[in-house]
Image (cartoon, helix red, strand yellow):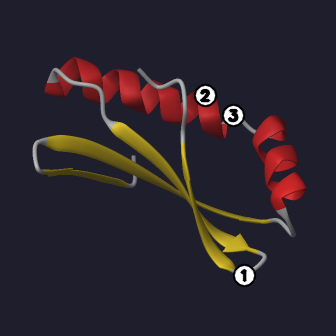
């Protein structure tokens, strides 16, 4: 977990990634080839266990085609 914070009673986990990708299809290929989504879901489970509520999980991809891309992770609850 790179960043964990609570705002307005809601926990959020942000996981930063530095992989390069050129477009939406490239991002989907990257996510299919890595364990980033599964890792994020494990983070969600840990925060849920410790905080007593499911967090919002965000992947912050630093090297997208136009810079930073923030992607929510679905299926985390």
Q: Earlier in the sequence, mark 2 or mark 1?
A: 2
Q: Position of residue 30 (x, y in %)?
A: 81, 48
Q: Are marks 2 and 3 in contact (CB under 8 Å)?
A: yes
Q: Position of residue 14 (x, y in %)?
A: 41, 53
Tag 2 secondary structure: helix
Residue 21 quadrant:
bottom right
Residue at image location 76% in from the left, 42% down from the top: 31
Pick out the residue farthest to the bottom. 66
Which label is found at residue 66? 1
CA gap, disc 2 to disc 1?
25 Å
Q: Which residue is mark 3?
A: 35
Residue 62 quadrant:
bottom right
Q: Position of residue 4 (x, y in %)?
A: 27, 50
Image position of 65 with respect to 7: above or below: below
Between residue 3 and residue 23, name the one nearer to us.
23
Say whether residue 49 is left or right of residue 77. left
Tag 3 secondary structure: loop
Q: Position of residue 67 (x, y in %)?
A: 66, 80
Residue at image location 10% in from the left, 42% down from the top: 9
The local crowd at label 3, few if under 14, some if 14 to 19, many if 20 or more residues have their Cα within 10 Å, is few
Q: Which residue is mark 2?
A: 38
């Amino acid at each position: 977990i790179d960043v964990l914070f609570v705002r307005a009673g809601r926990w959020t986990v942000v996981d930063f990634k530095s992989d390069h990708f050129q477009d939406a299809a490239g991002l989907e290929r990257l996510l299919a080839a890595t364990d980033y989504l599964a890792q994020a879901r494990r983070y969600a489970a840990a925060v849920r266990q410790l905080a007593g509520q499911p967090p919002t999980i965000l992947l912050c991809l630093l090297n997208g085609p136009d810079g930073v891309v923030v992607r929510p992770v679905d299926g985390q609850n």
